[in-house]
Amino acid sequence: MKRHIRLTILGTVIVTCLSAVAAATDLLLLLPGFPGTTEQAQPYVDQMLRYLETDMGETPFSMKGIFIPDGADAAERLASVKPGIALMEPSVYAMSQKTQKMQVIARVHANGRGEQTYYVVTRKDGAANLKALSGKTMSGVVVHDPKYVFNVLLDKKAPTDIRLVSQGRPLKSLRDVHRGDADAALIDQDAKDHMSELEFASDLQIIHTSAPVPAPAVVVLNDGRAKADAIRKSLVGLCDRPEGKDLCRSLTLTAVIPASDKDYRPLLAKYNR
C-alpha cells in the first residue's frame, strides 16, 4: 500500500511538472534558415525573456521561450505549445496564418535587411532554367513547405515535381550541388554574398532570383493578444536602446519596427493563389 501511495504521489508530481512546462512557453522563435541550434540559441532567448519581464513589469524568471530552427517542426510547435508571442520567418507565418489567430505587431530587420531574397543555383553544366529542373532535386533551408517554395520563392514558374530536400546550412546546399548530390540549391542573400568565397564558385550559376519577401514577423496570439500594446511598446525600437543593443547584436537583429497584418497581405496573396 505504501509503495502504491508513493507511486501515486510521484505520478501526480510528474504530471504537474509536465503541465507546468507545457503551459510556460511564452515565446517561440520560429526561424528556419537562421544559424544555430535550439541549445546554442537558448542563452540569447533567455536574455530576450529577461528583458521583456523587466520592461513589462512581469515576475522575474516567469517567462519561458525556445528557438526552433526546423521549419517542419515550427507549425506543429505553434499549435501545441500555444505561445503568447512568436517571432517567425515568413514561410512559417504563411503556412500557419489560416489555422492560428495571429496579430502582427512588428517585424525585425536581420543582418541589416528588412526583406530577404532567394536564389536558385545550379552547376554551369547543369539546368539552365527552372523548367529544366523537372524531376530533379533542390536542396535548401526553407523548403519545409512546398507551397511556399513553388508559389512564393519560385513564383509558380517551376515544375512542381522538383524534389525538395531540407538542408540545415545554405553553404552545404551549394556543396551538394557541386558534388552532384543535388541538382540545385535554394539559398538566401547571406549565402549568395559568400558564394564567391567558395573554391568551386566559378562552376556555379544563378538561374532564378526571387522577388523579395518581408522580414520575419513578430506576432501575438493566444494569451498574448491581451498584452499586444505592451509587447509592441517593449519590442519596437529595442535595438536602439542601450539595454537592447547587445541583445540584438547577439540575435543578428538590427531593428525592430512597427508592422501590422497589412504588411504581410501581399505575401499571403502569393502564397494562397
Image (cartoon, grey):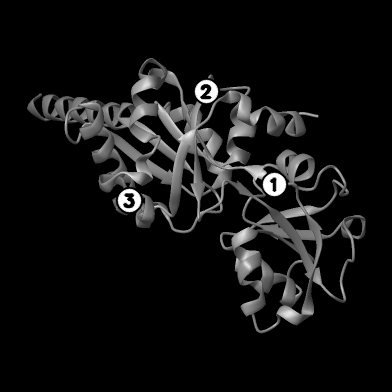
Q: Which mark is residue 254?
A: none
Q: Tell me the CA gap for discs 1 and 2.
A: 23 Å
- Residue 168 location (% of width, % of height): 56, 59
Q: Is residue 238 above or below residue 55?
A: below
1 vs 2, front mark? 1
- Figure quadrant of the N terminus: top left
Instruction: Return the residue at label 3.
Output: 245
Quadrant position of residue 61: top left
Residue occupying the point 31% across, 54% down: 246
- Residue 166 location (% of width, % of height): 64, 55
Mark 1: give few (<14), some (14-19) or many (20+) Cα within 10 Å: some
Q: Tell me the CA gap for discs 3 and 2.
A: 27 Å
Q: Earlier in the sequence, mark 3 or mark 2?
A: 2
Q: Amino acid at mark 2?
A: Met
Residue occupying the point 53% across, 19% down: 101
Q: Earlier in the sequence, mark 1 or mark 2?
A: 2
Quadrant position of residue 141: bottom right
Q: Tell me the CA gap for discs 3 and 1.
A: 26 Å
Instruction: Return the residue at label 2.
Output: 102
Mark 3: give few (<14), some (14-19) or many (20+) Cα within 10 Å: some
The answer to whether the residues at label 3 and label 2 have Cβ atoms under 8 Å apart is no
Instruction: Return the residue at label 1.
Output: 212
The answer to whether the residues at label 3 and label 1 have Cβ atoms under 8 Å apart is no
3 vs 2, front mark? 3
For label 3, the SS is: helix
For label 2, the SS is: loop
